[in-house]
Amino acid sequence: MDLAKFISGIDCGDASKPTAAALEEFEAKIGCRLPDDYRLFLLACAGGYCNAGAEFNWPHGDWAGAVQMVGGLRQDDPDSSLLHARNEPQWPTVDELLWIMCDHGGNPICMTIDPAHFGQIWFVDHELAEYEKPWTLAEAMSDNWGYVLPLAPSFSEFIAGLYEEAQAA
């Protein structure tokens, strides 16, 4: 799916497009400049509910899910606010993960903002995640824990892999 088609399927309500100043303010709050492809998306889309049926597969080809809620720089809707998700996450997380959207089951789709995995897109299986004790990103990515799973090496590649209806693997 191309970026314009993905954006056209997101119901942003009455929210206006974010400004460069709002993006820079958000980046200052999280302590890093986001990847250029994701910055362009944030400046073009306020975030909201995805009506487009944007489905995605695991890297090996099996169906993984469908995008439901997409984050943006808006402040009027906590369900699609990147800052709200960062400050008041609904699932176990670590600072290296930035929630950017969720799937149809409420599982977070995140971007890593740490230097070792910068800009990569990950699926967080909230049913398997550790809720009782702190954890590290390395632990969660390991085969022993496996609740932070890779989806794509970049935001652009994740979007390019989206499609409208289930396809046989």
Image (spheres, helix red, strand yellow):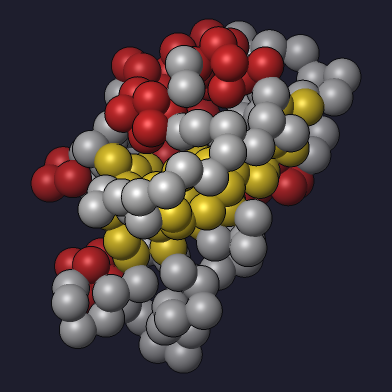
Task: Return the x and y of residue 52 as percentages of the image width and height.
Answer: 68, 30
- Nearest the viewer among 55 and 155 is 55
Q: Residue at x 45, y 69 (%)?
A: 125
Q: Quadrant of residue 157?
A: top left
13 vs 88: above or below = above
**Residue sitting at the far left:** 116
Q: Is residue 46 above or below residue 116?
A: above
The percent position of residue 73, horizontal first and vertical second, equals 62, 28
Quadrant of the rendered image containing residue 39: top left
Q: Nearer the viewer, residue 169 or 15?
A: 169
Regarding residue 129, the answer to whether it shows in the image is yes
Tell me: 125 left or right of 77: left
In percent of width and height, residue 153 lies at: 23, 38
Q: Is residue 81 visible?
A: no
Up the image or down, 96 lies above or below 33; here it is below
Name, please, the residue furthest toward the front.
168
The spot of residue 13 in percent (x, y) is: 85, 24
Quadrant for residue 35, please give it. top left
| Residue at 48 percent of width and 84 percent of height | 131
Q: Residue at x 18, y 73 (%)?
A: 142
